[in-house]
Image: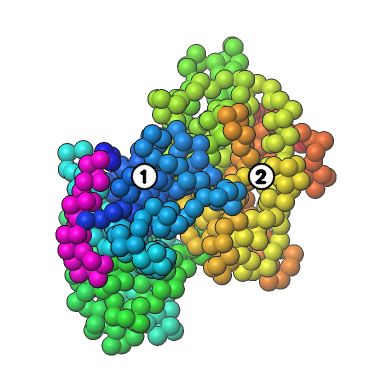
Amino acid sequence: MDLSTFRQLLKDGSGNDADSGGGGGGVGLNAFYIPSADEHQNEYPPEFARRRQFATGFTGSAGPSVVTETKAAMWTDGRYWVQAQQQLDTSQWTLMKTGVWSQGCPSVEEFLTKELKPGDKVGIDPRHVQHSAFESMRSALAKAKVALVPVSENPVDELWGDSDRPPAPSGDIFALDDKYTGQTVNDKLAAVRGVLQTNGCSSLVVTALDEVAWLFNLRGSDVPYSPVFLAYALVTQDAVTIYTDEHRFAPAVLPRLQRSSVSVKPYGAFFDDIATQAPILTEHGDIWVGDKCTEALWRLIPRNKACVKMTPTNELKAIKNDTELQGMRNCHIRDGVALCRFFHWMDAQFDGQRGSGMKLTEITVADKVEEFRRYEEDFVSLSFPSISSVGGNAAMPHYTPDVSTCKVVDNQHVYLLDSGAQYLDGTTDVTRTVHFGEPTAEEKRAFTAVLKGHIALARSIFPTGTDGRTLDALARAPIWQFGLTYTHGTGHGVGSFLNVHEGPMLLSFKKGAATHEGLHAGNVVTIEPGYYQENDFGIRIENVEIVAPSLEQSGFLQFEAVTLVPIQAKMIDRDLLTAEDIKWINDYHDSACRQVIGQQLQERGLVEVMEWLHASTMPL
């Protein structure tokens, strides 16, 4: 984005909202805040809504940004420090490193109050920022007599224009069969309405795309790698409306919705409809808008009539039913077959007699693992861009290869593959770190430390409702014993043929991981500790786990690993393992990988892959 042109738009007062109470009406702005999220607070917005990426050139998921009259800055956490340093034009943009391990990094509000003077105005698009964040920023800026001004037209959109901006998505919206969902739309509506009644609410506004998709058993392709579509929903005790573009429905969708008495209105009618209905709905109770309600939606609800707790759709979606849990197990078996075929193929490439002669780069190798996944039944797409990374590139936790950064995959460096897929019956996400030659003692020590952290959490038993911050520490403690650490969370929730990053579950050191009610049976999460040595190598070991009732202690929970991919033995320093560690690895390789995946390989006649699996899962 051309910053000089953008600053001129701010100076001219483009889009300034005269009704905001912030002194708008054509008066220029002195700064503008650009969040990463869109109208639906997507972690990964549709391409046409990636305004922050357009503004900064940074492609990561976390990077709120500010442009003032003289400076431009972007904030991101430890997952993206190296990537951001590479992608930002540092002659124009300043990288602000956030997180527990950053020192002296000012918040967005602190930066603005330092750069601006009393009477200055900061523009913000109320459609793209949560009400809670808006109020926090407004309050902080007000102390410095700086106004936060909502805009009716976003100057980033004005500068982006139509010629270079990707079009809005237009793919089909299709129905997901009940054999995958385990619940009908009527079942889910009844559960939601029960929660509304218990909480004295007249209605629920659903803005999160995965919640809309879950509620109506529909899927789409509007967001890359996530089977969701642009839509809102309004649920009352006697009516339900989905706001989306009906012409995009596959043939079976509308009759299914009509059988559940679901009305369909255009996507663009949502805000006007809420503005009209809100005064009527609040006569019968509060309107549940959720804890991620945007400022624009908040302004449509009569005061003191908005329920801002986590939505019932989010909580209900997070606890998978038996059908969804079995689907997760099944799709991970097929995914495990694909990955075993891939790693067998990769090992063969470094055998002079068996290699294909194909040039192995981070990109071609990522394409190959996708190819193996595409052979599997019910495959739909990848669940995120594959993190195929060699050596120093693997030290960037969320690195994605492109032609400018792509390295050759060789037998001299550590190779990290974090990848996943969307299947009709579930979503996968797995990371394995391997070496196609001989790892160094330092690499083995770091790998073993991370493995010990993974095992410590994976074999833990904990009370129902334990929060993610507590569980995060269980994985970090063994790694800390080696003087190592990592700057990302230990795990996240996983959707059922939905978002690969699903809330509210979060295993992290961040405060937010301790704010929800903790883990419950039926949750699905990842365990993925790591270690990253900048410019040298990166290590991460990730499995998807079902949270299940403990087999040993009543009222307690344990993890059930559904990821079935061997952990490379040559990366392990056996001398650093305890007897309990070794037993866990041997059990995982035998009962999970060898028996389950081995049977699939045998039934398919994949003899060489089965032999590779047998060799890869020999007891330590």
Does residue 591 sit above or below 505 in this rendering? above
Cα separation, mark 2 vs mark 1, equals 31 Å
Whether residue 284 sits left or right of residue 478 in the image: it is left
Q: Main secondary structure of the magenta part?
A: loop
- Quarter of the N terminus within the rendering: top left
Q: Position of residue 391 (x, y in %)?
A: 58, 27
Whether residue 84 sits left or right of residue 615 in the image: it is left
Magenta segment includes 26? yes
Does residue 198 sit above or below 242 in this rendering? below
As rendered, which of 527 and 218 lies closer to the eye? 527
Q: Position of residue 400 (x, y in %)?
A: 45, 35
In the rendered image, which residue does mark 2 sit on?
A: 485
Dot 2: within a 10 Å radius of its alpha carbon, few (fewer than 14), some, or many (20 or more) residues?
some
Stretch of the chain drawn in magenta = 4-27
As rendered, which of 381 and 288 lies closer to the eye? 288
Q: Which residue is pictured at 46% across the width and 36% down the height? A: 85
- Quarter of the C terminus within the rendering: top right
Q: Secondary structure at mark 2?
A: loop
Whether residue 586 sits left or right of residue 390 in the image: it is right
Which image quadrant for residue 217? bottom left
In the rendered image, which residue does mark 1 sit on?
A: 72
Give amino acid for label 1. Ala
Q: Earlier in the sequence, mark 2 or mark 1?
A: 1
Q: Nearer the viewer, mark 2 or mark 1?
A: 1
Q: From where the camera sits, is residue 8 visible?
A: yes
Magenta segment includes 76? no
- Colour mapping used in the image: rainbow
Q: Position of residue 57 (x, y in %)?
A: 35, 38
Q: Secondary structure at mark 1?
A: strand
